């Protein structure tokens, strides 16, 4: 069972490597990655299995035949001895590149009922054969095309593993950024609560001194209650973001997260996009793009194989047999031996072709449709990745400009709050004015947190869309330029 127990500490240890550590942990524990790795092992095993085609095939048979062993309308077992004989036979056939089947066989038979005048005797047969496909499967083309198809399927499985790694990394980055934003919002809520408490304390003192009327306490108490509720809500949001981060990692990190309210701002400081053209990018580093290319190549190999199967099957068979017989003659008083040797050879051409080839033609149409389908999937993927890259680039540059403006807004909101708080202490303003200024500052802080998170997420989206081609496979920590989060005056 995964224990959901990530705890936020202060910045006691370095935060620069925290995201790297989480990504590495996800690479080792993500179920999706483990499944993709098993897929590569399956593809490798399937490719290895195809090498069985080149294995020698051995056949052996032994038995006793009385009369005829032929069964009407059924194929008889190969290697049976002749009628009325005991026998044993063995043969081996080996495929040799570039496209020849070579085989040899031997048979030994003991004749029970030989020809008239001959007692029981022995017969030995030794033969060799060479088979050469001349049209269909010429040069073992079917096996070679299957090898090419399985190679591309293995490449596709490797690409799917790469795409899964990239997707897992992107998911960890997005979940981590969301976690940072919730921590920054929690710091904002905490500071807003402290300001509300301080205002209530000052209002109570001013009421005691008769500087402001007592009704000025009600807005301050209301605001404090709302801010305390907000603290609970942000705490719940942090827990949810923490759970989502654990979900994409696949395991609870063994060490406690060191994230604090500064981390979000520090990561955004100095962040730049790599020099990748938004249009015209090949996306060769993206796993999904590589997978579609490999699947297309596998489909093309299958189409070539099916085209080859439409050709007639024409084969040349060259055979040679040496036979020796050794029997006892009844005319010599039972002691004489008769026998002889014989050799034979054959060269045979065999042509075979189905009449309609309905199945092969239908499978060929299926393969061509699959090629066309993969071409459209590839086109859709290219359109989507191009749009993702352009959208992330625009989001990044737009967020950078928005951050400049919100930084000015935060500073002006802080000055306005200081001015309203001073007026209230002097009895010239109302608590409502101070609370409005506090809410404006809190809103500005929250907007800044949201913009920074959007900026970071856009950077992550851009790198993911490009396949992390210009990155060191990590989302680097940028040096801080002294930006101050809420609650750190």
Image (spheres, rainbow, N blue to C red):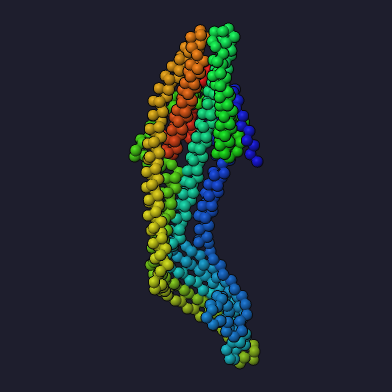
Q: Camera-side residue: 191 or 40? A: 191
Q: Is residue 477 above or below residue 286?
A: above
Name the residue: 48% across, 19% down: 436
Q: Is residue 321 visible?
A: yes
Residue 187: image quadrant is top right
Q: Is residue 139 at least partly visible in the picture? A: no
Q: Pick the quarter of the image with the N terminus.
A: top right
Q: Residue at image x 58%, y 82%? A: 69
Left or right: 297 with respect to 42?
Answer: left
Left or right: 415, with 111 as reference point: left
Q: Residue 478's spot in the image, x, y percent?
A: 47, 25
Percent of width and height locating residue 104: 52, 70
Which residue is nearer to you in this view: 211 or 54?
211
Whole-percent x, y for residue 393 in the image: 39, 33
Position in image of residue 67 (x %, y %): 59, 85
Task: Using the rendered view, name the quadrant where residue 288 is placed.
Answer: top left
Residue drawn at (56%, 76%), measured in percent from left and top? 77
**In terms of depth relative to the viewer, which is nearer, 250 or 239?**
239
Q: Nearer the viewer, residue 90 or 336?
A: 90
At a point 41% along the width and 72% down the height, the residue shown is 354
């Amino acid at each position: 069972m995964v224990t959901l127990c990530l705890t936020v500490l202060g910045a006691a240890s370095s935060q620069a490597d925290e995201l790297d550590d989480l990504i590495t942990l996800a690479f080792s524990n993500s179920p999706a990655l483990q499944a993709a790795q098993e897929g590569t092992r399956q593809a490798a095993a399937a490719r290895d299995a195809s090498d069985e085609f080149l294995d020698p095939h051995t056949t052996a048979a032994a038995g006793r035949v009385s009369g005829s062993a032929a069964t009407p309308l059924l194929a008889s077992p190969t290697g049976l001895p002749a009628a009325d004989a005991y026998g044993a036979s063995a043969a081996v056939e080996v495929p040799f590149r570039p496209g020849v089947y070579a085989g040899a066989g031997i048979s030994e038979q003991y004749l029970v009922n030989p020809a008239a005048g001959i007692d029981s005797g022995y017969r030995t047969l030794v033969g060799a054969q060479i088979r050469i496909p001349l049209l269909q499967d010429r040069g073992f083309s079917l096996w070679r095309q299957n090898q090419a198809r399985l190679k591309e399927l293995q490449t596709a499985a490797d690409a799917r593993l790469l795409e899964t790694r990239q997707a897992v990394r992107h998911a960890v980055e997005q979940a981590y950024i969301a976690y940072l934003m919730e921590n920054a919002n929690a710091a904002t809520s905490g500071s807003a609560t402290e300001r509300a408490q301080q205002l209530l304390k000052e209002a109570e003192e001013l009421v005691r001194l008769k500087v402001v009327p007592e009704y000025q306490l009600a807005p301050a108490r209301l605001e404090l209650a709302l801010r305390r509720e907000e603290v609970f809500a942000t705490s719940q949001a942090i827990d949810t973001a923490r759970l989502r981060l654990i979900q994409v990692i696949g395991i609870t990190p063994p060490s406690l997260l060191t994230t604090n309210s500064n981390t979000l701002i520090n990561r955004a400081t100095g962040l730049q996009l790599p020099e990748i053209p938004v249009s015209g990018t090949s996306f060769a580093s993206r796993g999904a793009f590589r997978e579609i290319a490999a699947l297309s190549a596998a489909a093309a190999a299958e189409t070539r194989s099916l085209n080859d199967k439409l050709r007639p099957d024409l084969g040349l068979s060259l055979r040679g047999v040496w036979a020796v017989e050794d029997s006892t003659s009844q005319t010599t008083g039972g002691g004489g031996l008769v026998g002889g040797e014989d050799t034979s050879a054959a060269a045979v051409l065999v042509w075979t072709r189905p009449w309609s080839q309905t199945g092969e033609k239908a499978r060929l149409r299926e393969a061509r449709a699959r090629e066309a389908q993969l071409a459209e999937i590839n086109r859709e993927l290219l359109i989507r990745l191009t749009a993702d890259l352009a959208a992330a680039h625009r989001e990044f540059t737009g967020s950078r400009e928005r951050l400049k403006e919100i930084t000015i807004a935060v500073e002006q909101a802080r000055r306005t709050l200081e001015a309203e708080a001073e007026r209230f202490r002097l009895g010239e303003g109302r608590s409502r004015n101070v609370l409005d200024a506090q809410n404006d500052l809190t809103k500005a802080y929250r907007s800044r947190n949201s913009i920074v998170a959007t900026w970071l997420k856009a950077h992550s989206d851009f790198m993911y869309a490009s396949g992390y081609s210009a990155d060191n496979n990590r989302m680097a920590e940028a040096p801080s330029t002294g930006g101050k989060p809420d609650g750190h005056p």
